[in-house]
Amino acid sequence: LAGRPVFTGFCASCHGIRGEGGAGPSFLGARLERDYPKPEGQVAFVAAGRGVMPAFSGILTHQQIENVVAYERQILSKAP
């Protein structure tokens, strides 16, 4: 998926290379779908940031944010 290199470059340092968590929360166990039932909510969160999560709207394009959200939801969140 197109979001993998974006995730590796910008997200993995906090969320782990497999989405297992670290400084940032884990994505495993369908957590993203629980926290953000619709992908648009997660896209908005990644763009705006909150707390220790930085805002990526000035760093990544909207398409890159949508791609990384899709990667996190479709690949990482489904991992065992």
Image: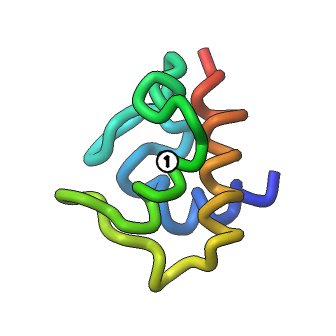
Q: Residue at x 45, y 67 (%)?
A: 47
Q: Residue at x 59, y 59 (%)?
A: 8
Q: Where's residue 62, x and y in %?
A: 63, 72
Q: Residues within 10 Å of mark 1 (few under 14, many from 20)?
A: many
Q: In the rendered view, how is the structure colored?
A: rainbow
Q: Residue at x 60, y 43 (%)?
A: 39
Residue indicated by mark 1 = 42
Q: Where's residue 4, x and y in %?
A: 70, 55
Q: Is residue 2 above or below residue 28?
A: below
Label count reads: 1
Q: Where's residue 44, x and y in %?
A: 47, 58
Judge from the rendering whether residue 31 lies leftward or rightward of residue 80; answer left or right.
left
Judge from the rendering whether residue 20 lies leftward or rightward of residue 76; answer left or right.
left
In terms of secondary structure, where does tag 1 sit?
Answer: helix
**Near-viewer residue (48 or 54):** 48
Q: Is residue 30 above or below residue 69?
A: above
Q: Residue at x 71, y 34 (%)?
A: 74
The residue under label 1 is which amino acid type? Gln
